[in-house]
């Protein structure tokens, strides 16, 4: 939809009855944002607002923050400062996307002290170690996405004792094993995305010892069969994603004793037909992706025949599967 006076009128008199208001990349500045804020005061239908990729600065954001009743707000890629962020932290917004907005330590502190916010997405926000530490002190946030912020182990010192977070995304942060060690010590996280980092077998071993994480994404790291072996006795993981690591069928053999996994992604590795001997031993599996490996027709046939009715999805795309000629 396009930003217009007619749209503002419909929002204001409550004839705009959609639950989502999408005004992405509409060249909205402070003046237009203030007009929008006035219109929002009378609307009871809108639950989600997308104002990303506009030109809204602090004054416009303050007006929006004061008027907004919608629980979901995307204000990513707007030129706001810590003052605008502080205003949002005091609003009624529960899910906030600030991606592309520079978040100073002061801004992170304000967000951490919010009593309404439950979820923050802050990709590529230049969050410092101190800023991350502040965010992890929040007692109310359930979900934090800090992808593309390039952190160090000092960022996670306060995460260890955090008891509110259940979802954490830290992909593309150049995290190493020491970071993984601290993350693994948290006892509230259920879903963790650590894809595209620099974690190897040692980091995988730390994470495998965690007893509460149910979904773990370690795709595009440096994990080999040794690291995969660490998850053999883990009894809490339901979903394990290891796309594009250094895994072979030997790793599949060591994982075969696991009886908690329901979703396993080993695509983009170096598994061959031998994996068909071991993976069906994981009786709990419902979804298995082996795309982009070295599995031939023989292995594909064995996998299809070996899994029982519990397996709902088997992805074998981009393997050298070619039925031999009779």
Image (spheres, rainbow, N blue to C red):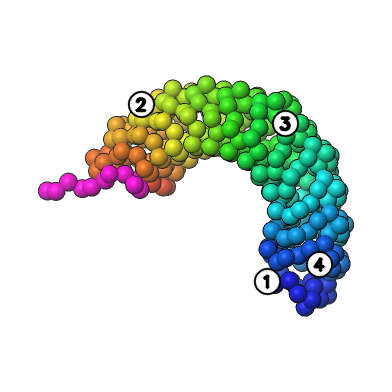
Q: Which residue is mark 4?
A: 32
Q: Which residue is mark 3?
A: 129
Residue 105, placed above or below residue 93: above
Question: Secondary structure under badge 3?
Answer: helix
- The picture quadrant where one finds residue 308 is top left
Q: Which residue is mark 1?
A: 1
Question: Which image quadrant: the N terminus?
Answer: bottom right
Q: Report x, y in % for residue 74.
A: 71, 55
Question: Secondary structure under badge 4?
Answer: helix
Along the line of sight, the residue nearer the viewer: 8 or 115? 8
State the separation of the CA atoms marked 3 and 2.
38 Å
Residue under the point 49% across and 36% down: 220
- Local crowd size for mark 1, using a 10 Å CA cut-off: few (<14), some (14–19), many (≥20): few
* Residue 174, numbered label: none
Along the line of sight, the residue nearer the viewer: 110 or 237? 110
- The picture quadrant where one finds residue 182 is top right
* Residue range corresponding to the magenta coloring: 316-326
Q: Which residue is mark 2?
A: 250
Along the line of sight, the residue nearer the viewer: 287 or 175? 175
Judged from this view, the residue extending furthest toward the left is: 326
Q: Earlier in the sequence, mark 2 or mark 4?
A: 4
């Amino acid at each position: 939809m396009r930003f217009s006076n007619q749209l503002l009128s419909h929002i204001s008199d409550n004839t705009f009855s959609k639950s989502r208001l999408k005004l992405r990349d509409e060249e909205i500045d402070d003046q237009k944002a203030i007009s929008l804020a006035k219109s929002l005061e009378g609307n009871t239908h809108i639950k989600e607002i997308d104002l990303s990729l506009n030109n809204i600065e602090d004054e416009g954001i303050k007006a929006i923050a004061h008027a907004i009743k919608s629980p979901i707000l995307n204000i990513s890629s707007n030129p706001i400062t810590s003052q605008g962020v502080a205003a949002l932290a005091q609003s009624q917004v529960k899910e906030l996307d600030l991606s592309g907005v520079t978040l100073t330590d002061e801004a992170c502190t304000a967000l951490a002290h919010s009593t309404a916010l439950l979820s923050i997405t802050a990709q590529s926000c230049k969050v410092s170690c101190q800023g991350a530490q502040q965010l992890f002190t929040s007692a109310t946030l359930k979900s934090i996405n800090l992808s593309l912020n390039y952190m160090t182990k000092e960022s996670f010192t306060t995460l260890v004792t955090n008891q509110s977070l259940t979802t954490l995304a830290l992909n593309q942060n150049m995290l190493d094993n020491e970071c993984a060690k601290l993350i693994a010590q948290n006892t509230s996280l259920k879903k963790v995305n650590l894809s595209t980092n620099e974690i190897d077998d040692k980091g995988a071993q730390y994470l495998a010892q965690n007893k509460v994480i149910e979904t773990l994404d370690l795709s595009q790291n440096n994990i080999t069969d040794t690291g995969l072996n660490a998850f053999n006795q883990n009894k809490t993981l339901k979903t394990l994603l290891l796309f594009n690591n250094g895994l072979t069928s030997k790793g599949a053999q060591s994982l075969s004793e696991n009886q908690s996994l329901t979703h396993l992604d080993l695509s983009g590795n170096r598994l061959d037909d031998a994996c068909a001997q071991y993976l069906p031993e994981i009786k709990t599996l419902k979804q298995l992706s082996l795309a982009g490996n070295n599995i031939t027709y023989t292995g594909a046939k064995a996998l299809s025949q070996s899994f029982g009715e519990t397996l709902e999805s088997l992805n074998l795309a981009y393997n050298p599967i070619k039925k031999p000629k009779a």
